[in-house]
Amino acid sequence: MSGRRRGPETGRALDRRIFALAWPALGALVAEPLFVLVDSAVVGRLGTPELAGLTLASTVLVTLVAIFVFLAYATTAAVARRIGAGDEKGALALGIDGVWLALILGVAISALALALAPSAVALLGASDVVAPHAIAYVRWSAPGIPGMLVVLAATGALRGLQDTRTPFVVAVAGAITNAVLCVTFVYGFGMGIAGSGLSTAVAQIGMGLTLGVVLVRGARARGVSLRPHPGGILANFRSGLPLLVRTLTLRAAIMVTVVVATSLGDNALAAHQIVNAMWNLVAFVLDALAIAAQALIGHGLGAGDRERVRAITRRTLWWGTLAGAGIGALVAAGGWLIAPLFTPDPAVRRAAALALLITGLLTPIAGWVFVLDGVLIGAGDGRYLAWAGVITLIAYVPLALAVRAWAPEGAVGLAWLWLSFAGGFMLARALTTGLRARGTRWMVLGA
């Protein structure tokens, strides 16, 4: 019996199943950083202060949203387990409660962003020239935060249901809408960087409404109540708390990186936005395999199939590392061609190209890390990931502070900063998650 079950879940058959989920997830994930890339390209033509302002503003905005990424990850794992155990109605109920939680958190975070934008930008060390642009972007994009969080929750539920195509279609439509509106508002209406923030808000609200409708229709078709259940909402929040801690450590590392980039001068800060936008794009590309791992690992554990879980882990890690090497080579070699797309400033171009060379060479480590994260998240091993996040943050901070203390301003300093982040920080993550994955304590079977 076990031999018959292993056969279809190994080798090429397993690869086909992985990529059947990964390719649509890839499209949806890539569409998200395209928001930042389009904003960076459009705003970069306004000038270096505007591009530097976008660096700080997008850091604030993404941090406020990304700390609640558990709305997607925890929901994917929980819904996939229920589906693996044959409880489709229970899986959809979890998804609906997740959307309600996203709406509640989104309204609160949106109000917080509007009120604290100046303080947050000042905390990041913005110069007097850069600060007004950063504040404008945060305030104009803040109304879209509820939509962003609903997108996370609804996408997580659909992934757990083994549907990565619907989020892909919606994400592509949202990215196209954002691109058109960004150019229209920034240049057509003369709104400057504020227009870029407004286009992001409008696109994200539209995406949230669309995915919410899809999930609601699925719930109604199966007789699942749409009313908020306080107990279910609270349970979703509790289950996501460890991942919230883990995400806070990741965002803290990114915030430290931005603070150090700010200390390296406005040119380095503007170049950091280009490198960071490309890093996010690469990360989301590699995360497609992590998403597939989340859904398949959760389903396998829910079905009680430990052997399949091991096979999925091995294959996704192989593909993640290989993809990291290939994509990294393209980034490393293409930095001098990528940088001019974002800015006409020669100093910013040089700094960005050198840092892209560093990050490209180190991307295979990221491919390994992102897939391992997906495996452990799919297993619901959030508590370990939270502790691992704290350890890796503690390991990274001295490296970043050393760059701030001793690295020169400009291109060389930015290169050292990205060596510390893409090298030191990611290596620490690889070690902590790799040690966990070698054992079996994370393989808890059942719904």
Image (cartoon, rainbow, N blue to C red):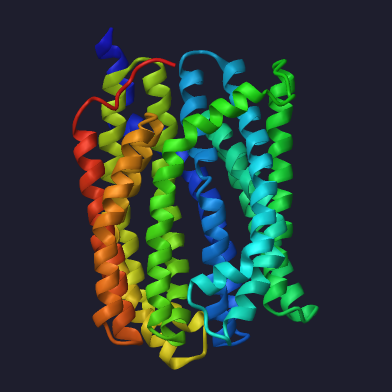
Looking at the image, which residue is at 24% across and 13% down?
A: 3
The answer, for residue 82, to whether it is visible in the render is yes
Name the residue located 68 percent from the left edge and 54 percent from the top edge: 110
Observer-nearest residue: 279 or 60? 60
- Residue nearest the viewer, comparing 279 with 419: 419
User: Which part of the image, by quadrant, shows the C terminus?
Assistant: top left
Identify the residue at the far bottom of this view.
Answer: 346
Picture coordinates of residue 424, whole percent (x, y)? 23, 62
Measured along the vertical axis of the image, is residue 383 above or below residue 326?
above
Q: Is residue 333 above or below residue 243?
A: below
Count of picture labels: 0
Residue 201 position within the rendered picture, expressed as x and y whole percent measured from the top left: 70, 59
Q: Is residue 193 left or right of residue 356?
A: right
User: For the point 63% across and 50% down, which residue is it?
Assistant: 148
Question: Which residue lies most toward the right here?
Answer: 189
Q: Is residue 155 left or right of residue 70?
A: right
As drawn, the residue found furthest toward the top would be 1
Return the residue nearer the eye: 333 or 190.
190
205 vs 350, left or right, is right
At 65% from the left and 56% from the top, the residue drawn is 112
Q: Where's the N terminus, which quadrant?
A: top left
- Residue 239 position, x and y percent, is 48, 30
